[in-house]
Image: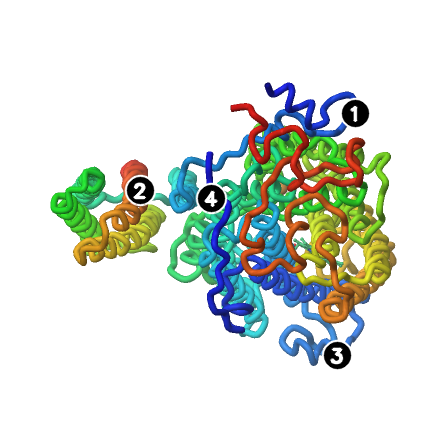
Amino acid sequence: MVRETTTEVHHHKETFLTRYIFSMDHKVIAIQYLITALAMGFIGLFLSWLMRIQLGWSGRQFPFLSRLFPGGVEEGIIKPEFYLAMVTMHGTIMIFFFITAALVGGFGNFLIPLQIGARDMAFPFLNMLSYWVFLASCIVLVVSFFVTGGPAAAGWTAYPPLSGVAEAIPGSGLGQTLWLLSLALFIASSLFGSLNYITTTLNLRTKGLSMGRLPLTVWALFITAILGLLSFPVLLAAAIMLLFDRHLGTSFFLPRLFIAGHQAGGEGGNPILWQHLFWFLGHPEVYIAILPAMGITSEVLATCCRKPIFGYKAMVLSLLAIAFLSFIVWGHHMFVSGMNPLLGTAFMTTTLLIAVPSAVKTFNWLATIWGGNIKFTAAALFAIGFVSVFTTGGLTGIFLGNPPVDIQLHDTYFVVAHFHFVMGTAAVFGIFAGIYHWFPKMFGRMMNEPLAKAHFWLTFIGVYLIFFPMHYLGISGVPRRFYDFANYDFIPPSVSGVNIFISIAALIVGAAQILFLVNFVWSLWKGPKAEKNPWKATTLEWQAESPPPHGNWGPQLPTVYRWAYDYSRPDATEDFVPQTVPVVGAPAGTDGGKH
Amino acid sequence: MSVITEKVRGRGPDSDIGRGDDGWGDSGEWRTLPLPTAQLGLWLFLGALAMFFAAFISAYLVRLPSPDWRSFTKPPVLWFNTAVLILSSIFLHASQIQIRKDNHKTFLIWLLLGTFFGLVFLGGQWIAWLTLQRQGVYLPTNPSSSFFYVLTGAHGVHLLGGLILLTLVCLRALRGKSLHFVASTLGLTTTYWHFLTVVWLALFGVLLIG
Ligand code: HEM
Ligand SMILES: [Cu+2]
């Protein structure tokens, strides 16, 4: 197939507004996404601090809190309904607005065109729209903190009837409506993004870049986009029905309810139906967050261990397998919903099957590290940390995938521990690995390595101190989404010591993120200038300038001659061979004379 | 042939375990899809839309057997609307065939007819809603009616989008824009339109059983 490889480099006039604000350049959009997502992440982190303060020292007065949230805090003590609102907003912000937005919107936008040798996305205007709709969804969500009743409080899963009846809890009023609107906007923005990522990956690869030569980051982002494309619309449909239930008197989900003696809600609605629809998105969503982090990990590990990624083909196939399976496991969130045990067994089987491709990936990462000439950059540390926390969280997933075990552990802190490892910290480690690795390409400057390493060690040790003890809390029966653990017969009093310990660790880890923030902001202006290829990596983006200009490449698009992982070839003088270096003896950029 | 290239690429004695540089990973075959970018984007969008409607339909099927479900007679005008929508799809298809043959006149007639029939369909759906209201069947009356309004509404909104696109295509064609330009937009819009016709048939089918 012949295609034009030289295109005119555009030199249309750019003002500050079109260049940095209403930009259609994928790199600017990526940075907009990344920074917005990080800002949301800090809000989510701040909320986790407040929750930990409550759980560690419940009953103690913190007057400064009253000043911050006059509606949610009374005389320095967080109100129970405000605690629930914080859990909800923390979960929602972290999952959708931080990790998904940073990994998919941030790295997806930055890496796909650069790593496939394209000048931009297939639909740049849609791409810009995607960011602005995302920003609107963030604003709607944040605004909900300031409406009467406060933000939504029905959990990030928004189960009706709590989310369906305005008088159920203060946050079920306007707050919940805004939550649903915000999510609808987020879904639209994600749809625009997915259309771009898939089309761009399929149609805009540069000459010589077959699918089998794609870096694993692109594979991961591509598959993630397919997941999002097919799962988010289902949540949109559900959100529309829930809005109708809330405001137009229908009863899709709302059963007949009595609140304080008078009837609220609908007729014979089916709340379980919401759970099915929600988790049909909800489970793929956790893979939407984790697959790109897996791609980043693979990429960073190969670069930093100076070794080809172990089992490239198996890596791609396992990504595909995970993506496929993720659509048929959602029922594992609903083992205790009165589900037919036979159906539960089916969901158990599919769930446990996911362990196979996940284990394949973990094995391959370890094999990549094994015997490597490891350069312990901050990015490498976070990538290795990813493997660690992902494995820790993945193992408890096998416990929870078994209905008899899950019936015990459901809605306890065991689950909180599980998902914070396997999805929460794992995705965040992926984000940090990605930022430390690609910051030079994004901004043309290096970050400070010692500071980054301090950030890693504090965070890595810290998250184990926070989340590992939660397994024991869960096993001893401590339920999640509880405001206070005193005065329950079934909760042993020893729990409070553990909680104080966790809370202290959480405060320290939260504070450690300031190291990252300082490093990020300082390096933007003061970091040493980055060269083109500071990590001596093979993929295409390192052949572009740092940062790449508008249009990414000079007049000529790069041509690819080899796969993405030619590290430490015995026949090469350097320990890496970029994808653009022709293979001696094979005709340039062709299919090697096959046709 | 390929064996030689593999050798050249270093698959020989020096290849160690884990070097995935084999025929699959590095055959060097480089293909983009035969679909143009805009069309690919549209098909992906239709995939997402299909999931959107599938979610509604499955919710409907789950809710259908519950004891509070009361059936109501569907307005007969729906049959007429269905026929009209199918015809409009056929007309648009005909118009596409004519544009490929460069028949400017006939192409325009079919296009206008197709667009007009689309409008008639939407009007007919409106009449169906009015009929229901006159029978006292409103959105919150019963889950059966809630689903009826929401499903037809969701479909109608998407159809309205298609109608706006078609109108734009008509205007362009009437203003004598180049046929080639019109053809590409018409092609995309028609694909979308056919998709909505198929969705309507599915929706109508499930609505009839409730
Ligand atoms: C140091 C960082 C973090 C701390 C200290 C923390 C702490 C907490 C706490 C205390 C809860 C509430 C538990 C309960 O009462 O049930 C919670 C819930 C949650 N967290 Fe985190 N978290 C952190 C990071 C993250 C990250 C990065 C994610 C990203 C996915 C995340 C996702 C969630 C979710 C989804 C929930 C459940 C919300 C719900 O129940 O609706 N967290 N977290
Ligand atoms: Cu799940």
Q: Looking at the picture, tell me which residue is in the foreground, A128 or A113.
A: A113
Name the residue rendered at 55%, 52% in the picture.
Answer: A159
- What residue type is disc 3 on? Phe
Q: Position of residue B16 (x, y in %)?
A: 78, 26
- What residue type is disc 4 on? Glu
Write down the quadrant of residue B106 in the picture: top left
Q: CA distance from mark 1 to mark 2?
A: 52 Å
Q: Is residue B76 visible?
A: no
Q: Secondary structure at mark 2?
A: helix
The image shows a total of numbered marks equal to 4
Name the residue rendered at 66%, 50% in the picture.
Answer: A543
Residues at circles 3 and 1 in contact by the CB criterion of under 8 Å: no
Mark 3 vs mark 2: in front: 2
Which label's residue is closer to the chain start, 4 or 3? Answer: 4
Mark 4 vs mark 2: in front: 4
**Chain under disc 3:** A
Tag shown at residue B14: 1
Q: CA distance from mark 4 to mark 3?
A: 63 Å
Tag shown at residue A4: 4
Mark 4 vs mark 3: in front: 4
Q: Is residue A144 visible?
A: yes
Residues at circles 4 and 2 in contact by the CB criterion of under 8 Å: no
- Kindly identify which residue carries mark 2: B191
Residues at circles 4 and 3 in contact by the CB criterion of under 8 Å: no
Q: Secondary structure at mark 4?
A: loop
